[in-house]
C-alpha cells in the first residue's frame, strides 16, 4: 500500500503541508477503510459484551499495530517531516470508562477481534466521560472531559431505537467504533447516544440539571447519585443502554432468520457487572411483545444471558429502590415482579430474593437466577463468591459458578507501550510471542545471562528517562533518574489503600529528616481519580498532594524522596508510567480487590509487585514464586474473620506502635496543615483512628518492613534484573486472549 498516496488523497495536500491533527484525521479515515474491508459476515451465534464502560485508550497506534502497518506508516510520516508520536498526541483519549472494569472490556474487544470471534461490544456514548481531573490548592476539582469534538473514530450508523423512559419516548442513535484484531478481522463496538442530547445543560464544573433526562442522558458516566434525581438518572442510563441493546440483538436475530423464542441459539449476552443487568427483564419484555409466552421468554433469555461479578463490595452490588424503578421504567415492573414471584415461591431464604423487605431490587440476584453463568474474575475472588458472599446462590446453582481470571491485551500494554522491550524480546525469542504470549516463558533461559539482564536494565532506564522528561515538562518536578520508581496508579478507593502508601512515605520523610537516608533515592508516583462525591477519597488525594509539596520544597528531602501525583490519570498516562516502573504497588486489603489488571500490566513490563495476597496478586505469586514478588499483610481469611468478629479497633494498633502513631498524627500535624486544609487533614486522621474500615493500620508494620526489604534488594541491580525478567517471562498467562478463549470455551460456545 502506498501510505503517502492514501493519506494525501484524504488531505488533498501534501503531508508536509498538513497540520498534525489533519494527518491524524486522514490516518483515522485510512484505518476505518482498512477495518471495513476486514469485517467478516456475522455467522452463527453471536456474543454481545454489554458494559457501562469501555476504557479504550487512544486507538490510532494500537490499530496501526494490529493492522500490521505501524512501521510502514511511521516511516512514511518520517520521510515527510512528521512523527507518528506527535500525530498520536493529537488524538483525544475516548472518555468512555472509569477504571479496571472498563479497561477489561476494552482488552476483551481487542482479544475478541484478534481471535476472530463473532462478538461485538455494546455500550453508551458519553460526551464528557467521568470527568477531567484538575488539581487546585492541593485538591481535586472536576471538569467535563470533552473528548468527543471531531471524534473521527465514531462511525454513524442507520440504526436507531425508541426507548421509553418515565413514559416519554427517547431516541437512541447507534455509533460504531472499529476494533481491529491483531493480524485478523475487525469487530465493532456499538455505542448508543441520545438524540437531542444537549451539552449546554452543563453549567459549572460537572454540575447540571439532573431532571432533564431528555437532554442529559448520555453526557456523563456515573453521574452523582447521592440524591433521588441522580439515582433516577442512573437507572435511566442503564435502561437506555439495555433497551437499545436488546432491540439491536433481537433485530440481528431476526435478520438471521432466528425465531424470537430461540434467541439463545443466535445470541449470548455477557453482562459486565450489574449495570446492564436490566437487559434480562428487557429482553423478556420484548419477546413477550413479539408474542412469546412468559415461560418461554424467561427460559430463552435465561439461556442467553451470563453475568460477570466484579466486586464483593456491597456498595457496588446495585440495589434499586422499587419506587424509583417504577418511575423510570414502569413497563419493566410486571416482568421484574414475575421474576421475583417465581423465586419467592421456590426459595424461602430471603438472601436470594430479588425484591427485598425494603422494596429494593437486587440486580445481581436477578442476574444470577435468570442467567446461565456467573463468574468471578480471579481465583481468590471466585472462591470468596462461592464460599462466602454468594454462598446461598452457590448452593442452589453450583454448576453456574465459574472463574475467569482477568487478562490484558499485550498488544497495547507491551508491544505499543514498550516498543524497546518488545523489540528486544523479539530478538531473544523470536516473534511468536506476539500472537501467543505464553511463549514469553522462553525468556526463562536468560535468567542468569548478565548481558541480557544489563540490556533489560538499560531499557527500563530509557523508559524512566522518558517519564522523567514528561514529569519535568508537565508536572514541574525533576526526579532523579537513578532513583527507584515506585508507582501506585489506580482509582482512588479506601480499599486500594493509597493512604497506607502515604503512611509509609510519611515514615520515610521522618527518617530522612532525622538523618537516615535511603541508599537509593525514591520516586513515589501516584495517579488516581476519586469519585466526585467520595469525601474520604478526595481527602486522601489532598494528603498526597500536600505530601508531594512538602517533600518537593524541602531541598534536603527531595534529594532522597520525591512524591508525584500525576493529574487526570488515564490510559494514555498508564502507557507512559507502567514501562518506567520498578515497584508495582498492589496493596489492597486482602479479599477486597476482585482481580486487578494494573498488576498484570506492570508485571509484563518488568516491574516487581509489592502486594497483599489479594485478587490476581495471588496468581502472580504462584507464577513467579516468593523470590520474585514482595508479599505482606493480613491474608483474606484473617481479614474476613476480623470483620466477622466485629472487634477491630484501629486505636489498638495506634497505641501499640510509636512509629505508626507518629505517622498518623503527622497527617493533621503542623507541617502538612500549613500546605493544605487542616479540616480535611484532621478529618482523614480521625477516620483512620476511629474507623479504618479497610484495616490499613494492622498492615502498616509489615508493609514498612517488606517495602524496605524490596528497596534493599534493589541495591543488587543484577539480582533485581533477574526478578524483572522472571516477571516478564511468567506474565503470558495474563493475556486477555487466554481469558477470552476461556469465556468462549466455557460460556459462549461460539462457532
Ligand atoms: C488498568 C487500568 C486500571 C485498573 O487498574 P487496577 O490497578 O487494576 O485497579 C484503571 N485505570 C486505567 C487507566 C488502567 O489502564
Image (cartoon, rainbow, N blue to C red):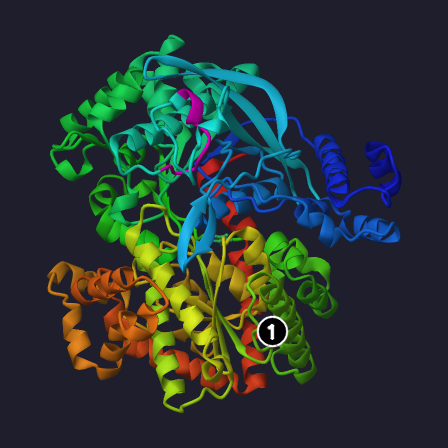
Residue extending furthest bottom? 515
- The image quadrant of residue 503 is bottom left
- The image quadrant of residue 30 is top right
The verdict on residue 168 being magenta is: no
- Residue under the image location 71 percent in, 68 percent down: 424
Where residue 637 appears, as percent x and y from the top left, is 23, 64
> Between 370 and 673, which is closer to the camera in this rendering?
673
Left-right relation of 503 to 605: left
- Is residue 300 in sight in this rendering? no
- The image quadrant of residue 696 is bottom left
- On the image, numbered disc 1 is attached to which residue? 444
Dot 1 falls on a residue whose secondary structure is: helix
Where residue 687 appears, as percent x and y from the top left, is 21, 62
Left-right relation of 156 to 316: right
Main SS type for the magenta part? loop
Q: Is residue 178 above or below residue 586?
A: above
> Between 180 and 292, which is closer to the camera in this rendering?
180
Q: Which residues are magenta?
A: 214-223
- Residue under the image location 39 percent in, 67 percent down: 546
Where residue 468 appears, as percent x and y from the top left, is 60, 69
Amino acid at each position: 500500500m502506498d501510505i503517502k498516496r492514501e493519506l494525501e488523497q484524504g488531505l488533498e495536500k501534501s503531508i508536509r503541508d498538513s497540520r498534525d491533527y489533519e494527518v491524524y484525521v486522514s490516518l483515522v479515515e485510512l484505518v476505518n477503510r482498512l477495518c471495513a474491508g476486514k469485517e467478516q459476515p456475522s455467522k452463527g451465534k453471536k456474543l454481545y459484551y454489554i458494559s457501562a464502560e469501555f476504557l479504550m485508550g487512544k486507538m490510532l497506534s494500537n490499530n496501526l499495530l494490529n493492522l500490521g502497518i505501524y512501521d510502514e506508516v511511521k516511516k512514511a510520516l518520517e520521510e515527510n517531516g512528521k512523527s507518528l508520536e506527535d500525530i498520536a498526541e493529537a488524538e483525544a483519549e475516548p472518555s468512555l470508562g472509569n477504571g479496571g472494569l472498563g479497561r477489561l472490556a476494552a482488552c476483551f474487544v481487542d482479544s475478541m477481534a484478534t481471535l476472530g470471534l463473532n462478538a461485538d461490544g455494546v455500550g453508551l456514548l458519553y460526551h464528557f466521560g467521568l470527568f477531567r481531573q484538575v488539581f487546585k490548592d492541593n485538591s481535586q476539582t472536576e471538569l467535563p472531559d470533552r473528548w468527543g469534538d471531531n471524534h473521527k473514530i465514531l462511525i454513524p450508523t442507520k440504526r436507531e431505537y425508541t426507548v421509553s423512559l418515565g413514559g416519554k419516548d427517547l431516541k437512541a442513535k447507534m455509533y460504531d467504533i472499529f476494533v481491529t484484531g491483531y493480524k485478523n478481522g475487525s469487530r465493532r463496538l456499538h455505542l448508543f447516544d441520545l438524540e437531542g442530547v444537549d451539552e449546554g445543560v452543563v453549567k459549572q464544573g460537572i454540575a447540571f440539571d439532573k431532571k432533564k433526562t431528555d437532554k442529559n442522558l448520555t453526557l456523563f458516566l456515573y453521574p452523582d447519585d447521592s440524591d433521588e434525581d441522580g439515582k433516577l438518572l442512573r437507572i435511566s442510563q442503564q435502561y437506555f443502554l439495555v433497551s437499545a441493546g436488546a432491540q439491536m440483538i433481537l433485530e440481528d436475530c431476526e435478520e438471521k432468520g432466528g425465531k424470537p423464542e430461540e434467541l439463545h441459539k443466535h445470541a449470548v449476552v455477557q453482562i459486565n457487572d450489574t449495570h446492564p443487568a436490566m437487559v434480562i427483564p428487557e429482553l423478556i419484555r420484548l419477546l413477550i411483545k413479539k408474542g412469546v409466552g412468559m415461560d418461554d421468554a424467561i427460559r430463552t433469555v435465561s439461556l442467553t444471558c451470563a453475568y460477570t461479578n466484579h466486586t464483593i463490595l456491597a456498595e457496588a452490588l446495585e440495589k434499586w429502590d422499587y419506587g424509583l424503578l417504577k418511575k423510570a421504567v414502569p413497563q419493566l415492573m410486571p416482568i421484574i415482579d414475575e421474576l421475583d414471584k417465581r423465586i419467592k415461591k421456590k426459595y424461602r431464604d430471603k438472601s436470594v430474593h430479588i425484591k427485598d423487605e425494603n422494596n429494593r431490587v437486587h440486580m445481581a440476584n436477578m442476574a444470577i437466577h435468570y442467567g446461565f453463568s456467573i463468574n468471578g474474575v480471579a481465583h481468590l475472588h471466585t472462591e470468596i463468591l462461592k464460599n462466602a458472599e454468594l454462598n446461598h446462590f452457590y448452593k442452589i446453582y453450583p454448576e453456574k459458578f465459574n472463574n475467569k481470571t482477568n487478562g490484558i491485551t499485550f498488544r497495547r500494554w507491551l508491544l505499543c507501550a514498550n516498543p524497546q522491550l518488545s523489540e528486544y524480546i523479539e530478538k531473544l525469542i523470536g516473534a511468536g510471542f506476539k500472537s501467543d504470549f505464553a511463549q514469553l516463558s522462553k525468556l526463562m533461559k536468560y535468567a542468569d545471562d548478565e548481558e541480557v539482564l544489563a540490556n533489560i536494565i538499560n531499557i527500563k532506564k530509557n523508559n524512566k528517562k522518558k517519564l522523567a522528561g514528561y514529569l519535568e515538562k508537565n508536572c514541574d518536578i525533576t526526579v532523579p533518574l537513578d532513583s527507584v520508581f515506585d508507582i501506585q496508579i489506580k482509582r482512588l478507593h479506601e480499599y486500594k489503600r493509597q493512604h497506607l502508601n502515604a503512611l509509609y512515605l510519611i515514615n520515610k520523610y521522618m527518617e530522612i529528616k532525622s538523618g537516615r537516608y535511603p541508599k537509593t533515592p525514591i520516586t513515589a508516583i501516584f495517579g488516581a481519580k476519586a469519585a466526585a462525591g467520595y469525601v474520604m477519597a478526595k481527602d486522601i488525594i489532598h494528603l498526597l498532594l500536600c505530601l508531594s509539596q512538602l517533600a518537593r520544597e524541602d531541598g534536603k528531602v527531595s534529594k532522597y524522596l520525591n512524591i508525584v501525583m500525576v493529574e487526570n490519570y488515564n490510559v494514555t498516562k498508564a502507557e507512559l508510567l507502567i514501562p518506567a516502573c520498578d515497584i508495582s504497588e498492589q496493596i489492597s486489603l486482602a479479599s477486597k480487590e476482585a482481580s486487578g489488571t494494573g498488576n498484570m500490566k506492570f508485571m509484563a513490563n518488568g516491574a516487581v509487585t509489592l502486594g497483599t495476597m489479594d485478587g490476581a496478586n495471588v496468581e502472580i505469586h504462584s507464577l513467579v514464586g516468593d523470590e520474585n514478588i514482595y508479599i505482606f499483610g493480613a491474608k483474606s481469611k484473617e481479614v474476613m474473620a476480623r470483620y466477622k468478629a466485629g472487634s477491630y479497633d484501629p486505636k489498638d494498633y495506634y497505641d501499640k506502635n510509636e512509629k505508626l502513631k507518629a505517622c498518623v498524627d503527622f497527617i493533621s500535624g503542623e507541617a502538612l496543615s500549613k500546605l493544605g486544609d487542616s479540616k480535611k487533614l484532621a478529618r482523614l486522621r480521625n477516620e483512620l483512628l476511629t474507623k479504618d474500615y479497610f484495616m490499613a493500620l494492622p498492615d502498616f508494620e509489615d508493609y514498612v518492613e517488606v517495602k524496605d526489604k524490596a528497596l534493599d534488594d534493589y541495591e543488587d541491580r543484577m539480582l533485581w534484573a533477574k526478578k524483572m525478567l522472571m516477571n516478564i517471562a511468567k506474565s503470558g498467562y495474563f493475556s486477555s486472549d487466554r481469558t477470552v478463549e476461556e469465556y468462549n470455551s466455557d460460556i459462549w460456545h461460539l462457532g
